[in-house]
Amino acid sequence: MRVQTASLDGVLLFLPTVHRDDRGLFTRTFDSKVAAAHDVHGAAFLQDSQSRSRLGVLRGLHGRSGDGEAKLVRCAHGAVHDVLVDARPGSPTFGQHESFRLDDVDFHHLYVPPGVLHGFQALTEVADVCYRIDRPHDPSKDIAVRYDDPELAIEWPLPLSTISTRDAAAGSWADLVATLTV
């Protein structure tokens, strides 16, 4: 498994080796030694979750307040356009965003440090996204920014087909920044 650094500070892209033959394929989706070698403390991951989305569905942009939440994100089935936004006030890449294609061909996955917002759009008829997080989910710590915030100017590849009421009502980037710098 190889690891590449992304342009956002602390974000890593894990590139597992996929072994294919006439039976199908095999790939390792997590290796604690590789993670530890890149200061990702895999033993701290406590919870796995999975979402399933239809073509054009957009989820995000989500994060956690306080100490945040580190996560390892991968697309187990289908493909997604995955977007990260750095919401860490002291970070050299604060306010910047970066996007990645995650799919069931290459099985790349992202290490998302605490304080980085995450969202994605399904690019295939069905897309299953798996999340490995380092602490139990606490809904009282949820934060969100609208996917179409003009200040962030994120380009999504498809027309929006569906978004949750909560995500559609999310606040602006400017509103979140005001709460982070108080």
Image (cartoon, helix red, strand yellow):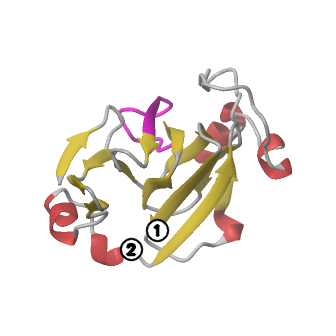
Q: Which mark is residue 111?
A: none
| Secondary element at tag 1 | strand
**Looking at the image, do the residues carrying marks 2 and 1 touch, with CB atoms under 8 Å apart?**
yes
**Which residue is depicted at the point 27% across and 68% down?**
41
The image position of residue 157, as x and y in percent, is 60, 24
Q: Which mark is residue 133?
A: 1
Give 172 or 129, whichever is nearer the viewer: 129
Circle 1 residues within 10 Å: few <14, some 14–19, many ≥20: many
Residue 137, compared with residue 13, is above or below; it is below
Q: CA distance from mark 2 to mark 1?
A: 5 Å
The image position of residue 76, as x and y in percent, is 46, 57
Circle 2 residues within 10 Å: few <14, some 14–19, many ≥20: some
For the magenta stretch, what is the residue range?
87-101
Residue 136, compared with residue 156, is above or below; it is below
| Secondary element at tag 2 | loop
The reply to whether residue 68 is in sight is no
- Mark 2 lies on residue: 45
First in residue order: circle 2 vs circle 1 = 2
Question: Hey, what amino acid is under mark 1?
Answer: Ile
**Which residue is depicted at the point 21% across and 60% down?**
39
The image position of residue 138, as x and y in percent, is 64, 72
**Which residue is depicted at the point 22% across and 67% down?**
31
Give 182 or 70, whichever is nearer the viewer: 70
**Which image quadrant is residue 66 in?**
bottom right
Question: Hey, what amino acid is under mark 2?
Answer: Phe
Left or right of residue 101: residue 178: right
**Which image quadrant is residue 70 in?**
bottom left
Q: Quadrant of the N terminus?
A: bottom left
- Magenta-colored stretch includes residue 91: yes
Q: Main secondary structure of the magenta part?
A: loop
Count of residue discs: 2
